[in-house]
Image (cartoon, grey):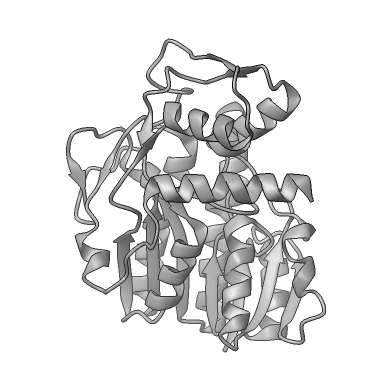
């Protein structure tokens, strides 16, 4: 099958390219390299079933050329600004890299008769709703970050385009995804800070923030397993039924880096930054009913990721 992976040089997108090729698909990887990088896909460049295009998915002319030339059968849409802190400083990046790319891709699908899509959404669409298990039927979507609002708007566009054009769309709302090739987030930040100064670690927030962390390999297995969806929009919360707090992550990083006397300086707020959701609880019954289940707990995913990132740093 000819697949177009938009955001294919990014953290998650590059892993998806690997899996799709391993399953015998022809992959067109498209990325503007604003968040992705060539190092993530350089091992695929000479593969006969892989093509990389450095293009902006938010440009209608670009996408018309891609759809005309390659006639993709399935669109995997992972193009977005994935760094919530970055868009807090400049909301324009969410419009450019998340909302506009979604609109252009959906309109291109309409024009060229492509019927199947995967969309990478997020737990951030729910906003800060603590103390209640969030499921796919939760009607109150109140994102508190520009990132979450852009994803929610994208889901709304997907709903309308799917209804009007008989599309089949798989939407995953996932939590913090970690693993090799990640470019930001608490694990990445802690390792970077401690490599710069192994004696001190400054933590955003008081360290009580606690979230589910899912390894990218588990996410990719879920995408592959559930890609064949019926007509309409199929929404899934996907994640792990455990969580890890920031203090524990700091201890794991220090331990794996063999740093014994680090002065850890915590903030006073229960959030790391404005727009951060310090805690939420997912209801995973719907995705569990499909037979999919994460192979790693949150702690196991964090531990494996720290080791993976450090192994790359030493290479």
Q: Position of residue 286 (x, y in %)?
A: 22, 64
Residue 125 in the image: above or below residue 163: above
Q: 46 or 166, which is in the foreground?
A: 46
Question: Which residue shows up at 67% across the image and 26% down it?
Answer: 193
Q: Residue 10 vs residue 150: left or right? A: right
Residue 198: which quarter of the image?
top right
Q: How many marks?
A: 0
Does 47 sit above or below residue 178?
below
Q: Report if residue 185 is visible in the image.
A: no
- Look at the picture and state if 253 lies above or below 241: above
- On the image, the x and y values in percent for residue 161 come to 41, 68
Say whether residue 306 is visible. yes
Residue 298 % position (x, y): 39, 47
Q: Pick the residue in front: 65 or 281.
A: 281
Instruction: Residue at the far top: name it.
Output: 268
Q: Position of residue 36 (x, y in %)?
A: 70, 54
> Seen in the image, is 301 located left or right of residue 234?
right
Q: From this view, report whether residue 132 is shown above or below residue 114.
A: above
- Residue at left offset 46%, top offset 76%: 224
Tell me the quarter of the image containing the N terminus.
Answer: bottom right
């Amino acid at each position: 099958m000819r697949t177009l992976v938009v955001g294919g040089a990014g953290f998650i997108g590059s892993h998806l390219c690997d899996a799709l090729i391993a399953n015998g698909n022809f992959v067109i990887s498209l990325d503007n390299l604003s968040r992705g990088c060539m190092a993530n896909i350089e091992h695929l460049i000479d593969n006969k079933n892989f093509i990389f295009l450095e293009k902006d998915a938010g440009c209608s002319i670009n996408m018309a050329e891609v759809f005309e030339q390659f006639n993709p059968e399935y669109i995997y849409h992972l193009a977005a600004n994935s760094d919530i802190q970055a868009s807090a400083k400049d909301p324009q990046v969410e419009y450019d890299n998340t909302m506009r790319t979604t609109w252009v891709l959906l309109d291109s699908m309409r024009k060229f008769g492509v019927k199947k899509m995967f969309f990478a959404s997020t737990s951030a669409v729910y906003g800060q709703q603590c103390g209640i298990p969030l499921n796919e039927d939760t009607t109150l979507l109140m994102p508190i970050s520009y990132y979450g609002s852009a994803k929610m708007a994208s889901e709304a566009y997907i709903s309308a385009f799917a209804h009007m054009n008989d599309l089949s769309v798989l939407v995953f709302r996932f939590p913090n995804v970690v693993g090799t090739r990640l470019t930001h987030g608490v694990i990445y930040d802690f390792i970077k800070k401690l490599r710069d100064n192994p004696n001190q670690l400054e933590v955003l927030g008081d360290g009580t923030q606690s979230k589910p962390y899912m390894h990218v390999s588990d996410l990719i297995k879920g995408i592959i397993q559930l890609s064949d969806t019926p007509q309409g929009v199929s929404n899934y919360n996907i994640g792990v039924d455990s969580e890890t707090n920031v203090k524990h992550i700091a201890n794991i990083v220090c331990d794996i880096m063999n740093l014994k006397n680090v002065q850890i300086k915590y903030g006073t707020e229960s959030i790391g930054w404005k727009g951060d959701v310090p805690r939420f609880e997912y209801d995973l019954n719907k995705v569990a009913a499909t037979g999919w289940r994460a192979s790693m707990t949150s702690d196991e995913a964090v531990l494996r990721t720290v080791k993976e990132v450090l192994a790359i740093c030493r290479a």
